[in-house]
Amino acid sequence: MTIWNPWHGCHKLSPGCANCYVYRRDESIGKDASVVKKTNDYKLPLKKNRQGEYKLTKESGIIYTCMTSDFFLEDADEWRQGCWDMIRARRDLSFYIITKRIDRFGECIPSDWGDGWNHVTICSTCENQAQADYRLPILLSHPIKHREVICEPMLEEIHMEKYLATGRIEHVTCGGESGPNARPCDFKWIKEVRRECVRCNIPFTFKQTGAVFIMDGKTYHIERRHQMSQAAKSGYSYIPGSAVADAIVYKLPDRDSLFQHLGRSEFRSRFHLSEKEINYISEKGMDTIYQHAVDFVTRRLAPQNPENDGKQTPMRGHPVFISQHATACCCRGCLEKWHHIPSGKVLTKEEQDYVVEVLMDWIKKEIGTVNMHRGE
């Protein structure tokens, strides 16, 4: 990882800045991180070795720019043009700029920026929903060749699918907060953003758990040295078209507990088979209904990224459709939330069989209830 810090120091701007690692580190050595100064590395992209060759080459990898400040900080306005000049001169390198000040982007770009420079990625942070709704529309409105989003520290559940659906965001990263005063990060927040990325076919990285990590209602305190490795071990990063999600370990819910849980949901419990659907089942026979369930699951639910996921199951028209909504087997997001089967993977034969069994169990229960009321 190559870091270029042309200046150091910043000013806290939003809730994500509260426990800033730069402030924490500077304070430990008696330094004031709010004082912004140009560094000795200001001209790093142009520095050469004794042989007259650039010190930074393609082999240096991505050049993470301004990691102890913000590239669009007002205090650095007089130095920024010089950085743009160096970035322009080094088109053989890839520069990566993370900012909380995307709202200053338009007034800070060089005159020849055009529709963006291909070797520059602009990454906007958004630690909560308010910042996502403020910053991401701005990120999308500007001419940028490569856009990314990072939610770190992630402070609450964030929904950004409407921004991801534009197809103009290339990658999303999420992670918890580190340090002695770290605020908690809930795994369900991570999984929700991941599900949205999967639906939009966008790569997702679960970078780190943070120091205080909540999973399944339990709080874990994780040492700094394990935070990134634990996130990687979870397998919850996502690469479209790959099989990385196959490594995610999960446990299917107990069938009785599942139906009890579904029964407590106001939305799920409102679904029932009508007289028309009962008659349809009687006419076709359970074997045919079973084959319909197999077909629907195979075509609409089993692919890694089903077409129109989240809207692929009609609310009516077939007993199996009704059962899918009643049992939360209607889309991959619901399948993950209720049945723990991760999105972003092709359903195995065993997983497909499980879903079909759940659907048929519900249909049989419905028929049994109707017959009981009929006195049959």
Image (cartoon, rainbow, N blue to C red):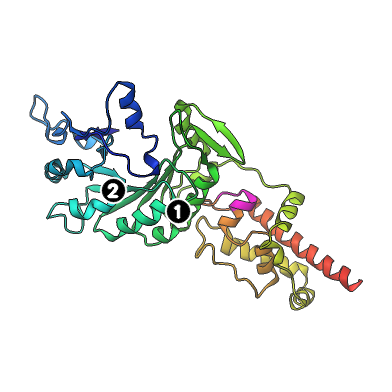
**Res 165 visible:** yes
The correct choice, above or below, for 224 with respect to 193 in the image is: above
Quick check: marks 2 and 1 in contact, CB under 8 Å? no
Residue on which disc 1 sits: 197
Q: Quadrant of residue 249?
A: top right
Q: Quadrant of residue 98?
A: top left
Question: Depth check: 216 or 286 in front?
Answer: 216
Q: Residue at x 11, y 42 (%)?
A: 82
* Label 1 crowd bin: few (<14), some (14–19), many (20+), radius 10 Å: many
- Left or right: where does residue 230 sit relative to residue 6? right
Range drawn in magenta = 336-342
What's the mark number on residue 151? none
In the picture, the quarter occupied by the N terminus is top left
- Left or right: where does residue 240 sit relative to residue 217? left
**Amino acid type of disc 1?**
Cys
Q: Residue at x 60, y 49 (%)?
A: 341
Q: Residue 257's spot in the image, x, y percent?
A: 74, 49
Does the magenta segment cover residue 339?
yes
The correct choice, above or below, for 298 with respect to 153 in the image is: below
